[in-house]
Amino acid sequence: MATQSFVQAIAEAEQIIRSAPHAQTEQDLAEGLDYLAGSIKASLHLAWAYERDFPFFVASTGPYAKLGLDNPDTLYFHAYVRDDAEYVVTGRRGTTADLSFQVLNGDYSPARSPDSLTAFDDRDIEIAADGSYELRFGPPGTDTGPNRFALAPGSAMLIAREVSSDWDAERPGEIRIHRADTLGSAPPPATVEKMTRRYDVAGRILLTRLRTFLAFPQWHYLDLPVNTMTEPRLTPGGLATQYSSVGHYDLDDDQVMVITVPACADAPYHGFQLGSLWYVSLDYINHQTSLTADQARVDPDGRIRYVVSERDPGLANWVERTGHRRGFLQFRWQRLARDLKADDGPTVEVMPFDALPQRLPHHDRQRVTPQEWADRISARQTAVARRMLG
């Protein structure tokens, strides 16, 4: 059977989910099985998208196929490439806070992250007055002139990211890719042998995906002291203008974590999110589990104070744990024109829930009514539905 290897991979993948060290409760397992469903879908999608001669952009992750502590504010796209061919990327710049491109020399594995060979944002390219652009990626020697970039030996994947800070006002752009010498022709017809190989590849993608991103947090998060966050640092993986601060939390339901960070005028995009121990975002559609600087309420002293809590404090900057006693914390600053320093980063304080009114600066200014909160959630649901279909 053509699908036999993929069926076996799914069974093995379920065992990986069930045996994960943190899968201790019914909610943990239910979320793990949901994560597995998204990973199955994504693995099939990725296996069928492996078309280096007739490439197309696919969504790398999204709300129903999550991966690698996915950023709720980002649309991720990637296409497979080969280092001896020339590719043309055309598009139209949207109104998002950031648009960036990156070339990797492979994919993630349980043992290593791929190297970033090229990374830049749209400040490095020429864009026409109507927002249109054309980029060319090819072997070294073909990268002379504007909007031309070299594909270094080993180049295997081109990634594009569109990042929104204001979900309501900003709109994604358009993006397409083709290989320069195959446009106007067609790939050979499918064969049973090729489809069988793709099912086998999909199974291997599935298992690698799960093993990699269960190991990944140990590399970057879990060795840090609990309930702390790092100073801002260049994000591992070679993103040219992104800094991040990371941590992990462990809180009782009668505790809250207050994270204070300066509002950064030098970062067009500044976002914060929580993640589960499956190393994916929490439900950011129906709950406020993330906030950008545009979505957050800034205090009069120029600081943003996020309140990470299971219980509802009735505050605008409440970041919902949604039943997750433990999880990951992540800040990202993007499109920076300067290096961030320690005092640009977050400070963390854990306190009893009942102490918030006395210990949270500008507490009364942060208050929201139940109807105002419902309006915030409604706006998230509407904005995500619009953005994901854009």
Image (cartoon, rainbow, N blue to C red):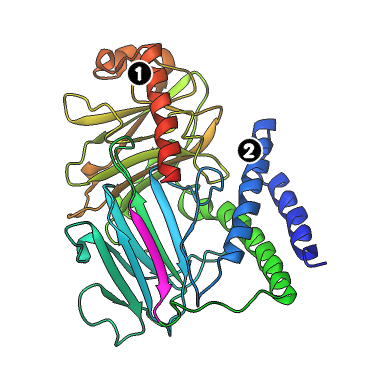
Crowdedness near tag 1: few (<14), some (14–19) or many (≥20) residues, C-alpha within 10 Å: some
Which of 214/188 is in front? Answer: 188
Name the disc covering residue 382, or none: none
The image shows residue 279 at horizontal and vertical percentages of 53, 46
Name the disc covering residue 315, or none: 1
Residue 239 in sight from this viewpoint:
no
Q: Magenta stretch: residue 229 in it? A: no
Residue receiving disc 2 = 31
Image vertical order of residue 23 relative to residue 241, above or below: above
Drawn side of residue 106 relative to residue 338, left or right? right
Residue 73 in sight from this viewpoint:
yes
N-terminal of the two: label 1 or label 2? 2
Image vertical order of residue 201 relative to residue 364, above or below: below
Drawn side of residue 103 relative to residue 135, left or right? right
User: What is the span of residues highlighted in magenta in the rendered image?
Assistant: 173-180
Q: Quadrant of the N terminus?
A: bottom right
Q: Helix, strand, or loop for circle 2?
A: helix
Whole-Å distance between the Cαs marked 1 and 2?
27 Å
Q: Amino acid at mark 2?
A: Glu
Q: Which residue is rendered at x = 46% and y = 21% of the image? A: 255
Q: Which residue is rendered at x = 64% and y = 41% of the image? A: 34
